């Protein structure tokens, strides 16, 4: 059996990004999003959340901690985070998400994939197991570690973000036509409008992805291939 999830990262990162993600979900083919809850724009994003499938985009790279507000996150210092702190912070961010949108998160992934740091993965896994939530794995080693810790995860991960837009219409068609036949497949994406308040290296690229996921031909391709994107559950 196969389940395919198309998840948009960064809901709550910037108002223009959140607006674009909402459009990609309501008018396009994106089936799920993950929300940052410790940004200056998280509350604005929450006003757009009605009816959307929303997980937690655990943010340990930027802005302030939810569990320890005096602590300012810096991406380069992620290697120094302790597992116990990450566990507490994950639980606090999950609670913050529920308070903002009025329902529990569907799953967890991590901004900048900082759960490649062993202590971050350990603390995150403990929090996820306590809440019964799946966690995105980005490679075989992480997948094996999460499974060994009793945390549900995806079997396949596809997606990236770089200098060029990753999800062009051509790339999307290629991936859809070569999806594995079995397992939970998560496609990571970053649609949106170019950020209006936050400086980001992935800016105009988001608009390319948004156009891809809202395109008539993308919807037609899914229908022709019998592919239906689902939310995490």
Image: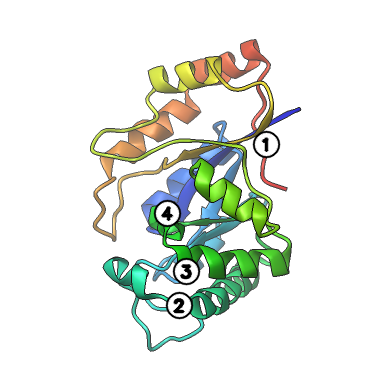
Q: Are marks 1 and 2 in contact (CB under 8 Å)?
A: no
- Residue at (27, 67) in percent of width and height: 76
The earlier-in-sequence mark between 1 and 3 is 3
- Dot 2 surroundings within 10 Å: few (below 14), some, or many (20 or more)? some
Q: CA distance from mark 4 to mark 2?
A: 16 Å
- Residue at (37, 84) in percent of width and height: 71
Q: Which residue is mark 4?
A: 113
The earlier-in-sequence mark between 4 and 2 is 2
Query: Is disc 3 placed on a helix, strand or loop?
Result: helix
In this rendering, the label closer to the viewer, 4 or 1: 4
Q: Are marks 1 and 3 in contact (CB under 8 Å)?
A: no
Q: Position of residue 126 (x, y in %)?
A: 63, 69
Q: Is residue 61 above or below residue 168?
A: below
Q: CA distance from mark 4 to mark 3?
A: 13 Å
The earlier-in-sequence mark between 1 and 2 is 2
The one nearer the camera, 122 or 208, is 122
Q: Which residue is mark 3?
A: 119
In this rendering, the label closer to the viewer, 1 or 3: 3
Q: CA distance from mark 1 to mark 3?
A: 31 Å
Query: Is disc 2 placed on a helix, strand or loop?
Result: loop
In this rendering, the label closer to the viewer, 4 or 3: 3
Q: CA distance from mark 1 to mark 2?
A: 34 Å
The earlier-in-sequence mark between 2 and 3 is 2
Q: Which residue is mark 2?
A: 82
Q: Position of residue 51 (x, y in %)?
A: 68, 50
In this rendering, the label closer to the viewer, 1 or 2: 2
- Dot 4 surroundings within 10 Å: few (below 14), some, or many (20 or more)? some
In this rendering, the label closer to the viewer, 4 or 2: 2
The earlier-in-sequence mark between 4 and 1 is 4
Q: Is residue 217 above or below residue 39?
A: above
Q: Which residue is mark 1?
A: 230
């Amino acid at each position: 059996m196969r389940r395919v999830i198309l998840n948009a990262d960064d809901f709550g990162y910037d108002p223009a990004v959140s607006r674009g993600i909402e459009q990609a979900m309501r008018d396009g083919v994106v089936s799920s999003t993950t929300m940052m809850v410790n940004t200056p724009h998280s509350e604005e994003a929450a006003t757009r959340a009605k009816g959307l499938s929303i997980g937690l985009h655990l943010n340990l790279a930027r802005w302030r901690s939810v569990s320890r507000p005096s602590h300012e996150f810096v991406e380069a210092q992620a290697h120094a985070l302790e597992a116990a702190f990450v566990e507490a912070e994950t639980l606090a961010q999950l609670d913050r998400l529920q308070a903002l949108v009025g329902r529990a998160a569907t799953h967890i992934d991590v901004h900048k994939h900082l759960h490649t740091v062993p202590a971050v993965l350990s603390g995150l896994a403990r929090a996820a197991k306590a809440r019964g939530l799946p966690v995105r794995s980005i490679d075989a080693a992480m997948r094996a570690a999460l499974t060994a810790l009793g945390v549900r995860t995806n079997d396949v991960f596809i997606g990236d973000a770089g200098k060029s837009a990753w999800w062009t219409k051509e790339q999307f068609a290629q991936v859809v036509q070569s999806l594995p036949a079995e397992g939970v497949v998560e496609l990571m994406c970053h649609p949106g409008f170019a950020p209006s308040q936050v400086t980001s290296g992935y800016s105009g690229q988001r608009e390319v992805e948004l156009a891809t996921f809202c395109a008539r031909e993308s919807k037609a391709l899914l229908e022709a291939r019998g592919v239906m994107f689902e939310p995490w559950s």
